[in-house]
Amino acid sequence: MVLAALLAVSVLSESAYGATETPDLSGIYWATEYNAKIQLVGGGDLPLTAAGRAAYEKNIAGLKDGSVTDAARKYCVPDGLPRVLATPYPFEIIQAPPGQITIIYELNHQIRVIRMDKPLPGEKELISFPFYNGHSVGHFDDDTLMVESAGFNEKTFVDATGAPHTDEMRTVERIRKISPTRLEIVITVHDPQYYTRDWQARFLYNQRNDVRLEDYLCGEEHRDISSVRGVRRR
């Protein structure tokens, strides 16, 4: 029911790069821009509930005084959704073997596996075995890869500013090529405990045949992504 509601929300943007068969999304991609704060489709601020605002304010203050830790940066754990979509480093989509799509992010060497031949685990398993990036399943709808994710832990932020989510968050990503060399991801976030309504964010990436994924030794280097433009050039 939640999935149906999320799929009903869509964004009309650039014309789709059409496909008459299952699209091949394989390749290395790099975001066209990086924003520490999540940028909503249509603009505006996150539609926080009172509980969500309290959690956000606690995170903002805690990140400043050290009482809250950005685990993704300090301990090199996965960023979680939707924050990982704003990665300032390249990532690779591998559309093989049959039955799954794998996304490898250079940042923290994160790996997401999207199961194409299985449903999401049952509620008991989602609660008992939460993941940083959630459990993900997908299918193609014409030229668009639809990915539903659930079963998140609460150790990550929505973005680099500390925007919160609960372990009940569910997301749907619409991933498609809008030109031969440009990828679009639109994510819809459903988390009624912290947000008064579902909201969307849109990310654009250029396909890059001239780069490869490199080692990212987070534990050794403690690189600060706020200065990422000085680390790797687009």
Image: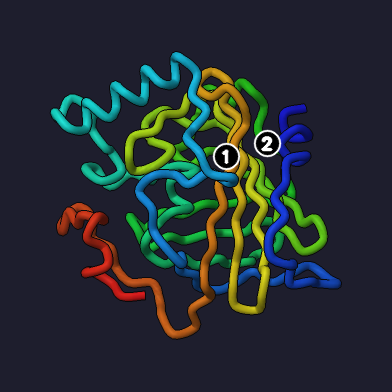
Left/right placement of residue 167 relative to residue 35 reads right
Q: Hey, what amino acid is under mark 1? A: His
Give the secondary structure at mark 2: loop
Q: Is residue 149 visible?
A: no
Kindly indicate whether the residue at mark 1 contacts the one at mark 2 (C-beta within 8 angstroms).
yes
State which quadrant residue 96 falls in.
bottom right
Q: Nearer the viewer, residue 38 or 1?
A: 38
> Could you tell me residue 233's position as x and y percent?
31, 75
How far from the left and from the top, in percent, is residue 196? 58, 22
x%, y% of residue 100?
Answer: 65, 56
Q: Nearer the viewer, residue 40 or 182?
A: 40
Residue 131 seen in render: yes
Residue visible at 41% across and 29% down? 164
**Residue positioned most to the bottom:** 210
Q: Amino acid at mark 2?
A: Leu
Among numbered discs 2 and 1, the one appearing first in the sequence? 2
Quarter-of-image position of residue 127: top right
Q: Which residue is mark 2?
A: 120
Left or right of residue 21: residue 226: left
Q: Position of residue 225 (x, y in %)?
A: 26, 56
Q: Residue at x 65, y 32 (%)?
A: 121
The residue that label 1 is drawn on is 135
Whether residue 204 is situated above or below residue 114 in the rendered picture: below
Q: Residue at x 60, y 56 (%)?
A: 185
Instruction: Single out the residue that lies furthest toward the top.
Output: 50
**Alpha carbons under labels 2 and 1: distance apart:** 7 Å
Q: Is residue 227 placed above or below 138 in the rendered structure? A: below
Q: Residues within 10 Å of mark 2 (few under 14, many from 20)?
A: some
Residue shown at the point (61%, 61%) measured from the top left: 184
Q: Quadrant of the C terminus?
A: bottom left
